[in-house]
Image (cartoon, helix red, strand yellow):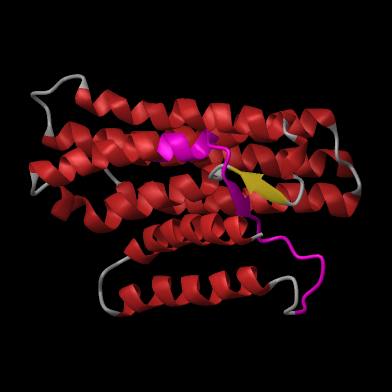
Amino acid sequence: MKRNIPNAITCCNLISGCIAIVFALYGEVSMALLWIIIGAVFDFFDGMSARLLNVSSPIGKELGSLADDVPFGVAPSCIVFNFLSSIHQHVVFLPFIAFLIAAFSALRLAKFNLDERQATSFIGLPTPANALFWGALIVSMGDKLESSSYLIAAVVVMIFVSCYLLIAEIPLFALKFKHWGWKGNEVKYIFILTAAVMIVVPMLMGLGVIGISAAIAWYTVLSAVTSKRN
C-alpha cells in the first residue's frame, strides 16, 4: 500500500496541472497560477514521501517527469498562449510560440532523469520555477504588458530566453539542506530571506504576485554569480 502513496501524490500533481490548463484557456489566469502552485506542493511532497517511506522506484521517477510537464510546462504555455491570443488575434501564429515552453520543459525533465549531476543541485532552470515566473508575470502585469507592442515583443523574447535557460548548462543551487547551519548554506539562506522580501513587499503595496517572478529572476542571477565564484 505505502509504495503507491508517492505515485498517488504525483498523479495529484498531474491533475492539478490539468485543472490549471482549463482555467488558463478560459482566461482565469489567477486560478491557473493557484493550481500551478498546488501542483508544486504535490511535486515537493511526492519525492519527500518516496524517500521517507523508502519506496523510490524507476516508475516513480519516470511518472514524476511525465506528470511535471503538465503543471510546469503545458499550463504556463496555456497562460501565455491565452495572453498573446487576446491581444494579437490578427497575428495567427504568434500565440502558438508560447507552446515552446511546454516542449523545452519536457526536454528539461528528460535531461534531469538522465543527468546524474543533479542530485544536490540543478543544471538549467527547474520547470516549477519557470512555470511560477510566467504565471505570476501574466497575472500581475498582463494589463500593462498588452499596452505596448514593445512590451509584447519583450514577452516573446523572454519566451525564447526561458526556453534556453531550461536546457542551458548553467548550475543553479537547490534548496536542499544536509544540515541547518549557516556555514555551507549561506547562499540558500540569503536567497530565502531576500526572496521573501521580494514577494511580500509588492503584495503589501498592492502590486500582486509580481514578486514571485522577480524572485525567480533573482534566483537565476544569484545562482549564476555564485557558481562562477565556486
Residue 223 is covered by the magenta coloring: no
Q: Percent x, y for residue 61? A: 75, 34
Q: Nearer the viewer, residue 51 or 226?
A: 226
Q: Percent x, y for residue 158? A: 31, 41
Q: Nearer the viewer, residue 68 or 21?
A: 68
* 3 w.r.t. 184: above or below: above
Q: Nearer the viewer, residue 219 or 76?
A: 219
User: Residue pushed farthest right?
Assistant: 54
Magenta span covers which residues? 162-181
Q: Is residue 214 left or right of residue 125?
A: left
Residue 174 is covered by the magenta coloring: yes
Q: Is residue 213 visible?
A: yes
**Residue name at image x 66 percent, y 59 percent:** 230
The image quadrant where one finds the N terminus is top right
**Residue name at image x 27 percent, y 58 percent:** 140
Q: Is residue 1 visible?
A: no
* 200 w.r.t. 27: above or below: below
**Residue name at image x 28 percent, y 33 percent:** 81
* 96 w.r.t. 166: above or below: above
* Quarter of the rendering containing residue 109: top right
